[in-house]
Image (cartoon, grey):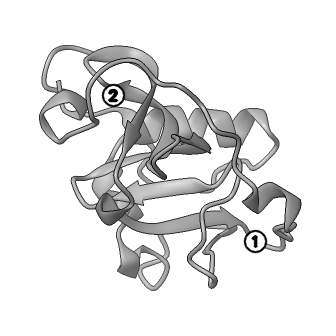
Amino acid sequence: MGPGTSWCASFVNWCMNQAGYINTYSYPALAYGWKPNAWAEGEIHGIDRDPKGVPFLGAIVVFNFSHVAFVVGQTNDGRIVALGGNQGNYYMNITSVGSGAVLYYMKPRGYIVSSESEKLPVLNVAGGEMTYENTHN
């Protein structure tokens, strides 16, 4: 993929496939496809929005700047730490963002979120904040 290609959703889809959740998303490369009405349009299969709206380890997190990644922890000041592709001007990276940028958290259909997985590890993340500019290059 060349410059200007937004491929964060391709990374998420690839990870889901590796975990056995095959063909969960009809448009694997497009982050905007994880929009709220994608379920009604039949674009997302076997993935549900988490009704509690609480981050948990491994959750798919959708941001308000057309980016999707996985929750891997939090910072000391409560920022969400996410692992994703095409973020932070790198191919794959772990970086943080304020919770105000989160649209929602998602999980595989039928997955039970344990209270233990809601206790996010505190991680020290170097680098700047995740933004639209450094997730769309």
Label 2 sits on residue: 87
Q: Dot 1, crowdedness within 10 Å: few (<14), some or many (≥20)? A: few
Whether residue 39 sits left or right of residue 73 in the image: it is: left
Residue appearing at x 54%, y 66% in the figure = 105
Residue 131 in percent (x, y) is at: 20, 40
Quadrant the N terminus occupies: top left
State whether residue 13 appears in this view. yes
Res. 29 mark: none
Residue 5 in percent (x, y) is at: 21, 27
Q: Quadrant of residue 9?
A: top left
Residue 38 in percent (x, y) is at: 41, 74
Give the camera-side residue of 73 and 136: 73
Which is in the foreground here, disc 1 or disc 2?
2
Quadrant the C terminus occupies: top left
Which amino acid does the dot numbered 1 rest on?
A: Arg
State whether residue 44 appears in this view. no
Which amino acid does the dot numbered 2 rest on?
A: Gln
